Amino acid sequence: MKFFSIEGPLYQFFSRLLDMLKLNFLWLLFSLPIVTIGASTAAAFSITLKMVDEREGYIAKQFWTAFKANLKQGIPTGLLNLFFVYALYLDFQLFHAVEGNPIYFLILGIVGSVMCFGYFIYAYALMARYENTFLQTLKNSMEICVKYFGKTILIAVVLAVELVLFLFNTTTIFLGLLVGPAVMFLTISGPAMYVFRDIEKNNE
């Protein structure tokens, strides 16, 4: 039956699931030193961007090549990203801890979260696809975020839904550990590829 053949949907589903498991494992493994999380994320995006076009090959080999290529720029990007996330965490902790819950902590946290999202949502995909400076990559990410605001909001909503689903119970948390980050990278990569092609076409 064609449903169970290598061209059938069942085989294609399990083949993609296996690829996502491999990619997620590699991302976790290469992110373990913490300082390399940026390069590891850019390498993961190099794979998911190709998945959008269904032209990914040997995942481990391509991941390693992309990891090495993005190591120099990925380290400062990843560390800055972690710094922003930790600063936002402290801000919201202060909002709950300080007596009276001063509103300026909440406003600062919301504004900071929006800026952090804008600067980094496309940054790793840009790093994976183009050669640019560290600061230019962040600048380009924010500019894309603003110019393609509708698609950026769509990404944010889908990512929020995925995060809620992965944190729903112990079973989904386990599933999230297995494939969660890779699924989120793929979620971003679809709209990102559309944006990149549109920009490239307009610059021809």
Image (tube, rainbow, N blue to C red):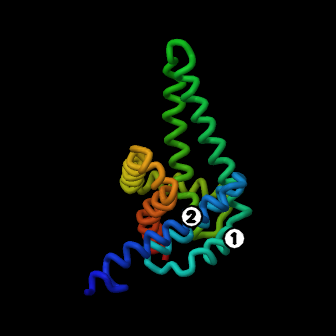
Foreground: disc 2 or disc 1 = 1
Query: Tag on residue 126?
Result: 2
The image quadrant that residue 40 belongs to is bottom right
Q: Nearer the viewer, residue 122 or 99?
A: 99
Residue that mark 1 sits on: 69
Q: CA distance from mark 2 to mark 1?
A: 13 Å
Which residue is rendered at x = 50% and y = 69% of the image? 48
The N terminus, quarter of image? bottom left
Give, as a three-letter code, the residue at label 1. Ala
Q: Secondary structure at mark 1?
A: helix
Which residue is rendered at x = 42% and y = 50% of the image? 171
Mark 2 neighbour class, 10 Å CA radius: few under 14, some 14 to 19, many 20 or more: many
In screen coordinates, is 96 left or right of 78? Answer: left
Mark 1 neighbour class, 10 Å CA radius: few under 14, some 14 to 19, many 20 or more: some
- The x, y position of residue 53, in whole percent, is 43, 77
- The x, y position of residue 17, in whole percent, is 44, 69
Q: Nearer the viewer, residue 135 or 193?
A: 193
Q: Is residue 158 visible?
A: yes
Q: Secondary structure at mark 2?
A: helix
Give, as a three-letter code, the residue at label 2. Leu
Identify the mark nearer the N-term, 2 or 1.
1
